[in-house]
Amino acid sequence: MTGLELSPAWTLVLGAALVPLLRGAWRGTWNVLLPLAGMVQLWLLAPGEYGQFAFAGQELLVLRVDRWSTLFGFVFLIAALLNSIYALHVRDAVQPTAGLAYAGAALGAVFAGDLLTLFVFWELTAITSVFLIWARPGERSYRAGLRYLIVQLASGMLLLLGALQQLNATGSLRFEHIGLEGPGGWLIFLGFGIKCAFPLLHNWLQDAYPEATESGTVMLSAFTTKLAVYALARGFAGQPELIWIGAAMTAFPIFYAVIENDLRRVLAYSLNNQLGFMVVGIGVGTELALNGTAAHAFTHIIYKGLLFMSMGAVLLRTGTIKGSELGGLYKSMPWTTSFCIVGAASISAFPLFSGFVSKSMILSAAAGEGHLVTFLVLLFASAGVFHHSGIKIPYFAFFGHDSGKRCAEAPWNMLVAMALAAALCIGVGVFPQPLYAMLPFQVDYAPYTASHVLAQLQLLMFSALAFSVLMRTGIYPPELRSVNLDFDWSYRRLAPAVMCGASAAISAGQSLLARGWSRLVQAVFATVRRLHQPGGLLARTWPSGTSALWMMVLLLGLLLSGYLA
């Protein structure tokens, strides 16, 4: 067999093309079987390189199987399986088709061994994933999807330009460590940064994810940004700039998440926060830090998917996801409430939950390498994520004030998907060794030491106390129907306003200049006519001596100008 036939990516991409041809239970069964088949394929793949072929004088590598790609490949397939189960109730063919093709494209990018193959699958993830946003009817979703597509395609164009620069500089398209030594590295770094939602480049995430369908948001949360984390780890491990970028990513979303009313948008900001931990780990660059990044990407895909699943179930049953319009749903949706709490405990890094065994590795690596300021920022961010995802999400959706909404529990397939995700969150938290065995480097780390557990419990308890005090004193920002301005306001509102103002000013200046020029020309012609009309200065008869004098003056001026030149 060739590498193309062995790749799990093609199983999902080609399998997705058959989804519209199936109906009813056959379609749902097919959607679930495809990720399972991909897992079997990946399990049978031995480490190595497959599918090499020559293109335009370059050796391309379609399928590279190593510890990095295997780990991300398995968790991507797990996410695809969970989402296929979660979306079994969906009747239209667009969402499962786009979702499976999107998952396959992400897998193809993970297994790519060269920059050109990476670019092809990188752009395919953008094209397939946008349909998960457009599948939700409405003008908001259409516009958000259009903006999302533009940003994602721009990321791919930067990757392609950087790849060509790398080819010119090194003579190779091999996707290995790249660094920032040349312009190609900077272009690729920026392309990866857009997809990873670096600060000031992040707003596509909060703009698009909450506008997708219930299952579409779950799918989006798993692949795009984690693919960028994988690419950064592969190409820019140990790059010190990433430490400060990641630290900023962990801190700034906290403030927006606290005041945000749309609970799926809260989770989108929280996603930004968690990506920051991974980026810090890549920047630190030690084996412990990179293991922590890989482990945290794995656990994050599962628990963030679980949180988005629970909010998707709420949206499906109540028709709203605004914190100001929810509350008291634990009475109607007890299972969804329980699963949401498991996801909240995992993202907050409670001991015995998955987030604890991965996030602590990154914190230990940052502290061990002497990055004290970064370590303190990460501690602050850990407390913040407990506030907005660990407490705010379940509290305002299921507890808090009773909104009076009474609805049915989530559909059985949604509950099954959430139960599997919750089981993984607890299983990995209690027994982390199977995950540690899959990590890129040999693991010599014990998460459950007295110091780790006590320090994390202290952080969480004081964070809970702070939340309680803020709520009791009325200082905590209330859930209000509002629009929060982020950096995207600068290019969605401010920049167009400035451009319109500048255009109006230029038009006014051009009009003023044209009127002034017209008046000047009219004045010149009037003066010429006045000088040449009968009795005018130039119409008179001048004496010969006067004419000779003026000729001498002109000749003298000409001689002086020639001399000075």
Image: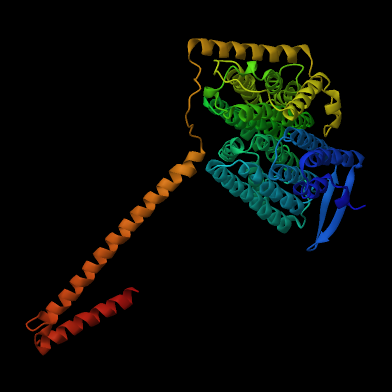
Q: Which residue lies furthest to the left in this view?
A: 535
Residue 377 drawn at (x, y percent): 61, 24
Q: Residue at x 71, y 58 (%)?
A: 168
Instruction: Quadrant for residue 555, please give it.
Output: bottom left
Residue 432 drawn at (x, y percent): 82, 23
Q: Residue at x 69, y 12 (%)?
A: 457
Q: Is residue 177 visible?
A: no
Q: Which residue is drawn at 64% across and 53% down?
A: 157
Q: Which of 4 and 251 is in front in this view?
A: 4
Residue 115 drawn at (x, y percent): 75, 51
Q: Which residue lies furthest to the front in this view?
A: 24
Residue 264 drawn at (x, y percent): 60, 30
Q: Can residue 72 be seen in this view?
A: yes
Instruction: Quadrant for residue 412, please give it.
Output: top right
Rendered position, 161 above or below 310: below
Q: Nearer the viewer, residue 197 or 164?
A: 197
Rendered position, 199 above or below 148: above
Rendered position, 128 above or below 552: above
Instruction: Quadrant for residue 314, please give it.
Output: top right
Q: Which of 21 and 544 is in front in this view?
A: 21
Q: Which residue is drawn at 92% across and 40% down?
A: 44
Q: Nearer the viewer, residue 393 or 187?
A: 393
- Left or right of 510? Residue 262 is right
